[in-house]
Every structure is written in C-alpha cells, then in structure tokens.
Image (cartoon, grey):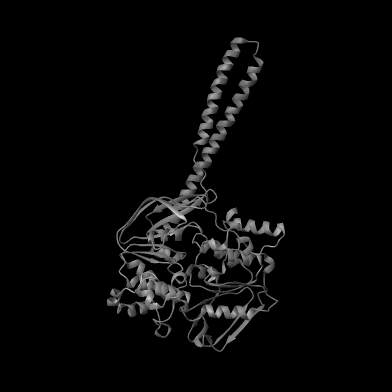
Amino acid sequence: MLVLDKVSINLTKEDHRLVDHLSFTLNPGDKYAIIGHEGTGKSTVLKELAGVEPLDYIERQGTIICQGKIGYLDQDIKAQWQDCDVESFFLKETPSAAINPDYYQSWHRIAALLEDVGFSQEAFSFEKKLSDFSGGEVIKLGIVRLLFHDYDLFLLDEPTNDLDFPTIAFLEQFMLTESRPILFVSHDVRLLERVANGIIHIQRTHKHTDAQTYFEKICYADYRDLREKHYQSRYQIAVKERQDHQRKLARWRAIYQSVEHAQNQAVRTPSTARLLKKKMKTMKAQERRLDKAEKTMTAIPEKEEGIEIWFDKSVALPAKKRVMDFTLEALTIADRQLSGPIDFTVMGQEKVVITGPNGSGKTTLLKAIYRAFNGRDDISVGYMPQDYHHLFTHQTVLEFLAVESSKEAEAKARKMLGALQFEREEMVKPTVALSGGQKAKLYFLKMVLDQNNVLLLDEPTRNLSPLNMPEIARLLKEFQGSIIAVSHDRAFIEAVFDTMVHLDKNGLKKV
C-alpha cells in the first residue's frame, strides 16, 4: 500500500511548484496513471516515491507512507546500468552493490520470465552488457527484473517504451491481472484506456510557476470526459459572472452619472443637495460592493492548450516522386546477421511505419537509410534517433535549433516554442535539463524550422504526453513529405501511417 497525504513538491532553484497537495491511497488492485504535459514533473514524482536516489533539486512537504518493497522501472535504464552485465542487473540492488546470493534460489524463474517477454535464446546472454541490447530489449530486461524480485508494489515510468507488439500485449495483460498495486506514467493511450482505474493529473499553471494536481478514481476515458465537462462548466460560470457584473456596473454608472449631474445642478438648493449627497453616498457603497464582488468571481479556468506547430507547405514533395529505392542482401551489426534481404521503395508523401520484434534491427535499418540519404540535394532529411537524450548538452534551446542571427528568425523560433508550451526562461535553458518529452518536442520543431521534407523517426512518441498525441498525429498526418518511422505506438500508427512493413529475421515485408 502507498499513501500520499497533502504532498507538495517544489523545484528548489526555480521556486516552482510541481505538485500541489496531492492525496491518494494506492491499494491492491489499483492501477493509477499519472498524466500531464511534458515537463510537469511526472518522472520526478515517481523517482521521489521510489526513493532510488536523493533528489537535491526538489523540496517535499506532506506525508508519504509505504508498506512494502517498491519495484521501480526507470525510463532510462541504460543511464545507470549500461556498463553492467545482465547477471549483475538481475542480482544486484544497484550497479555498485554486491551480488545478493539469496537471489540464486529463484534463478530458475529467469528462463521462464525471459520467454514470457519474448527473448530469443540466440539474442540473450547473461554475460552481455546492457549497452549491447536494443532499447526495447533493455525494457524487457527491466520488466523481467521487476517480476523476478518479490516486490509489493510497482512504479513504472513509460513501461511500453520501444517494446514490440507481443511484449506490449504481455505487459498489458500482466498489469490488468496483477493484484499488487501499480502506479505508472505512460504516453500509450491504449494502455491508459485499458489498464488505468485511477488518474492523477499534474497540471502547471500561471506560466508554469504554480501547480494544480487532481486525483480521480475513474478510468482514463471517463476522466477525459469529466475534465472537459468540468472545464466547460467552470468556464461558463466564470463568463456568466462577468457578464452579470458588467450589466450591474453599466447600470451603476448610468445612475451615478445621473446623480452626479443632478448634484452639479442643485448647488443652490440645500434640501435637494442633501438628498443627492445621501444618494451619492449610497452609490459609493454600491461601488465598493461591486469591486468586492469582482474580486471573488470564479476564476476563468486555464485551458491546457495543445501544441500547435505546422510544416510550411513549401516542403511538399510530389506524390509520384521516388524518394528512395533501398536494397540490402542482409541487415547486419558487428558481423551478426539481424535479418534477411531488404528491398522497399518510398514515394513522395508516403508515410511508412516499420514494426517488428525487439532486436530485429529496426533502429539499425533506420540508421542505414539515413546514411543512404547523405549527399542527396533533392531532399531535406530530418532524423530523430531513438537514443536522442545523450545528444542534448549544455547548449541552450535556441542554440540547439540553430536559429540564425537575424531577429526575425529568432522571433519565429520563440513564437513556435511558445506554441509548444515552452516558457520564455526555458528557451535559454540548457537542453540537457529538459524532460524527455520536451526534448522530443524540440526535435519536431527543429525539423519544422529546417524545412525537412523527409522525416526519419525512431519511436518518436516514446516520451510525449498522451494529451499532446492528437496534435502530433495531426502534424504528421498533414505533412506533405515522406515519413519513415519505427513505432509500436498503436494509436499513433492508426492515426498517421498508410503503409506498414514488418522486419524480422527473414527480411522486410509489407503488412
């Protein structure tokens, strides 16, 4: 069981609030999802609850009570464990800790768990380092590690990231049937719709300096509807109060001006002047009541605006243009064959998604395609790699976008960053300090500003909020260039792509 009572979390340096008086109880059978836009602190909340490392950049108030041992799935496992081999990953609490010999008593369970998440025998070795596995394979190892240990509750940060369809189905079924409580963050709309029975919504307000935090013990679809109804109701009440106030104020001004005019005319009539003076005193009292009423009116609720960026129509490719003819006898990495022959063509404005088992070489294939595009001057290629986190450094957001020195170019970039919910101070912030979702949005904006007409995207939605998914899907659906993407995001694939190809050990085939 996990209990939070009036928990608030502040960022110490920026003096911004992430979480405001959050209270909930996570009991057996509960599967609560934390949602919110990019940069609102969802991963920070999970890390603080997991207690895996001291977070010196936050301050916390309120009470947290945890009964039992927490199993935590980090969003970026490789950052901590990449130099460790698989055996150490399973048998150690932390990379620097000693191997716990007690875990060998349950070692026989490992093989069955690896089979459950779809690990092939040829792809697996206990001596391999985590850095040798693909992104999806590392997430699989993380899931096996959670199931191997006898945890009492689970905190999962983007558990479907980079997973293939069979493993997503396995994870979804596990989460649905597991009796132990689960708290998770996910961009996967389908997972949220099918698993979550409680929603924790972290919302940043007042230019990201304050927070509103909500908890509702309902499913995700019902919460979306409730949230919209709540917003519309509060908005209508706030508007009506202001309309009523304006009518009362208009009537008051008309009477006040009439009394003031009569007062000016009655200077030489003492009895009338006394009556008008008394009337004016009453009018002043009404003015004070109107001022007081204005201050207590229902605040107009802030709308969590969706992101709004668009590609210039000038980047459009002719639909009949042959963008790529790509052939390989076999896809290999480090002298190891990943798949058989590859032969496919992409036309202008075609949107192709590559699917397949983890470790089949999808990322390797996308990198090979990117290299094949080098030197082409008839197209402009934008590439969003899967492991883009390490590409962000201490350069600022504007420097990453490579904005020209002209004021006009910088003004355009700032305007579009604002449309992506970046605050002014975040535009000059080091990119390394951004959240995963903010980095993803920055890649999309760079491709827009660079006027790319061919996009290579490796799991592009893996860190984006589900609240922004409709806008990202719209952006790419309306894009009049070519897209070649690797993705296992079911809602994203359905919304954007018109061609699906499947990569496995036998090669690449159209689905």
Q: How many marks?
A: 0
Find the residue positioned furthest to the bottom: 329
Taking 410 as reference, is 484 above or below it?
A: below
Residue 164 seen in the current view: no
Residue 346 seen in the current view: yes
Judge from the rendering whether residue 163 lies leftward or rightward of residue 102; answer left or right: right
Task: Pick the quarter of the image with the N terminus.
Answer: bottom left
At x 48% / y 45%, what residue is drawn? 234
At which x and y percent is residue 258?
62, 22
Q: Nearer the viewer, residue 298 or 413?
A: 413
Which quadrant of the view contains residue 105?
Answer: bottom left
Taking 249 as reference, is 184 above or below it?
A: below
Q: Nearer the viewer, residue 411 or 319?
A: 411
Taking 105 as reference, is 190 above or below it?
A: above
Judge from the rendering whether residue 130 lies leftward or rightward of residue 428; answer left or right: left
Which quadrant of the view contains residue 218?
Answer: bottom left
At which x and y percent is residue 359?
47, 80
At which x and y percent is residue 42?
45, 59
Judge from the rendering whether residue 74 lies leftward or rightward of residue 1; answer left or right: right
Q: Nearer the viewer, residue 264 or 368?
A: 368
Judge from the rendering whether residue 390 lies leftward or rightward of residue 145; answer left or right: right
At which x and y percent is residue 305?
55, 54
